[in-house]
Amino acid sequence: MRKTLAEIKAMKAQGKKISMLTAYDASMSRMLSSCDVDVLLVGDSLGMVMLGYDSTVPVTMDEMLHHAKAVRRGAPEAFILGDMPFGAYHTGRSDAIANGVRFLKEGGCDGVKLEGGVEMCGVVRAMVDVGVPVMGHIGLTPQTASQLGGYKVQGKGLDDARKLLVEARALEEAGAFGLLIECIPDKLAQVITETINIPTVGIGAGIHCDGQVLVTHDLLGMFDKFTPKFVKKYADLSLGIKQGVQQFASEVKEGSYPAIEHSFTSEVDYRDLLNE
Ligand code: KIV
């Protein structure tokens, strides 16, 4: 049965940790939803992982929807969030609402996530007011990473930490149902988690968050361009994939694949066709 928004929110008070993973296609979302994963995120990280861009900035709404639809087809029972790409909520509240609604109506998502703090609260409020559930995202926000000095830990000093706490409170006040916090010190994540009433889901934010999210391709060892410190590799599929593919290529070249058990056979002598 698909989890409801109320059930996801209630997990904080119940002390149940939220597990969240990225999904970009139907076969992966089918596998993830058969495991104990509470939320699938169609993250704009698909720009790098699936589309080969250097950052999340070029990703478009149409690309996000293409993947969101596939994720929903693979996992009809999953709670799915669509990640609002850069530009989809920066040009005014009505554009943000329209794109949020597209994620729900066309992408089959249950809600959306968007990056930003106090400056995004008006947008969040407007979306929530028309019925688009929104998860906030603060700390390291990859869409604006260049303004933050790159992919760096945020909120280390007291002033920056205070700003993040203010942002967390403001997003809760604006109606966000949850908050993703990325790359901040674990004790700051603890203070934020204990201060707000909505669940925090951390990535590189330590153990004290109400839940954890990772990019699935990172935890499975399928994206080897770089591995952030906070990633734990639970498998090395990249190695397995390369070994399997190399064996296929070698067997094709040496003529040992396909074997008789991989072939369709018949009693008919088709060479008779050559004499017709
Ligand atoms: O797009 C993404 O994968 C994210 C991560 C922070 C999980 O937003």
Image (cartoon, rainbow, N blue to C red):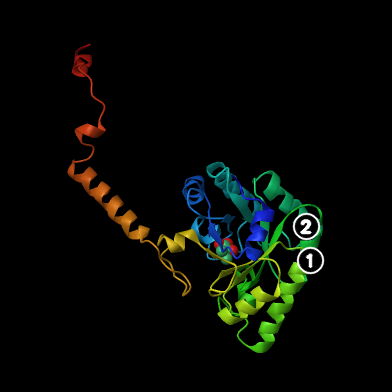
**In the image, residue 110 lies at what x, y percent?**
66, 50
Residue at (22%, 49%) from the top-left corner? 250
**In the image, residue 159 lies at what x, y percent?**
69, 87
| Residues at discs 1 and 2 in contact (Cβ within 8 Å) | yes
**In the image, residue 231 lies at what x, y percent?**
46, 69
Q: Name the residue under label 2.
A: 128
Up-down relation of residue 256 to residue 276 (above or below):
below
Quadrant the N terminus occupies: top right
The image quadrant of residue 155 is bottom right
Q: Nearer the viewer, residue 52 or 137?
A: 137
Up-down relation of residue 66 to residue 234 (above or below):
above
The image quadrant of residue 146 is bottom right
Ligand 1 visible in quadrant: bottom right
Q: Name the residue under label 1.
A: 174
Q: Is residue 176 among the parts visible in the rendering?
A: yes
Gap in Å between the C-alphas at discs 1 and 2? 8 Å
Q: How crowded is mark 2: few (under 14 residues within 10 Å), some or many (20 or more)?
A: some
Is 241 left or right of 174, judged from the image as shown? left
Q: How crowded is mark 1: few (under 14 residues within 10 Å), some or many (20 or more)?
A: many
Looking at marks 1 and 2 on the same chain, the residue that comes earlier in the sequence is marked by 2
